[in-house]
Image (tube, rainbow, N blue to C red):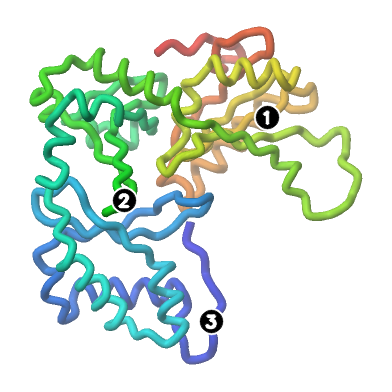
Amino acid sequence: MVTERKTAPGRLSFNEFMEAFRAQYKYGASQPLKKYSITEQIIHKNNRNLHGIIVRAPGNRIAPVFYYEDFYEAYRTGTSIDECIGKMVRFVSKNKFPDNALSDMFTNWEKVKDMLIIKLMNYNKNKKDILQRPYMIIGDMVAIVQIFVDDPTIGNGCVSVDNALLEMWSVGREELFKHAFENMNRFRIKAINLLDLRFDEEEEKTDEPNIFVVSYDAPFPGAAVLLRAEYLGDFAKAKDMDFFVLPVSVHEILLIVKRPQIGQEHLFSMMQAINSDTALSENMLSERIFTIDRNEKTLRYITDGKEVELIH
């Protein structure tokens, strides 16, 4: 989400800074960057949406990520845009990030299979991008497999598994997804009650719905927790509550306690508003509403007023 920031007179706002920075690295005199592919992406990190700049050498899967937020803080303290770009150029030039540094890891199935994770995305928004990748359609969503890299020299990041890697490993799609789903059980899940984040001392109203934000407590999009029906069922049982489940983005899901005053039409309107927000639509996950009950460990989705079991 783009956030307009206040700034001192004579200084660019955050949005203006991004535009000037972008124009400079695209059209300025930073020749060392001309040979690189530069893309920008909103990256969810440390519970924040950051504006990432990904600088990738031709043919490389691994690429360093820089953040506009970091450069802007330097700019506010007196560093020029040219100096910020210069730091990025020097870092990229010094650290080549060659694929062969991790080639053994990527080419060796025995080494890579424990690094596989699941990423859950909206199918319609990504159906062209997944054509060269193994995928699994789940309702109006699609699951792909990624390699989660956590290396002290380059930080952490994810590399999507494509059909070429699968062929190189001589591994079938079923085995690939089996390992990825099993690996997800190793990651801690966090559930935050939004009512716990109140900043006043008012007495909690009894008619306020409990809303939990649930995701993986890890540096990658965490909405694949939606597929952990056993965890969600255990959570509902521990809270002694039944929940509506809203897949609001690729980063997290919402659990809203089922109460008579909370109608399905209201929840669908909420989802429609979230998905139509241009600042949020990039991370859209699903248009469906799900349910999980305390006495079951089965995720169901609502269609035509009925609850149907989600099968994947």
Q: Is residue 93 left or right of residue 195?
A: left
> CA gap, disc 2 to disc 3?
35 Å
Q: Check disc 2 and give the amino acid type.
A: Pro
Extreme residue in the right direction: 203
Which residue is labeled 2 in the image?
Answer: 152
The label on residue 256 is: 1
Query: At 50% across and 41% down in the image, what residue appears?
Result: 275
Question: Which label's residue is closer to the chain start, 2 or 3?
Answer: 3
Residue 228, x across and y down, in percent: 50, 20
Q: Quadrant of residue 264?
A: top right
Residue 158, x across and y down, in percent: 30, 41
Q: Residues within 10 Å of mark 3 (few under 14, many from 20)?
A: few
| Above or below, comparing residue 55 to residue 123 in the picture | below
Q: The residue tagged with tag 1: helix, strand or loop? A: strand
Q: Is residue 208 left or right of residue 5?
A: right
The label on residue 84 is: none
Q: Is residue 289 left or right of residue 163?
A: right
Question: Which label's residue is closer to the chain start, 1 or 2?
Answer: 2
Query: At 31% across and 77% down in the image, what residue appears?
Result: 84
The label on residue 7 is: 3
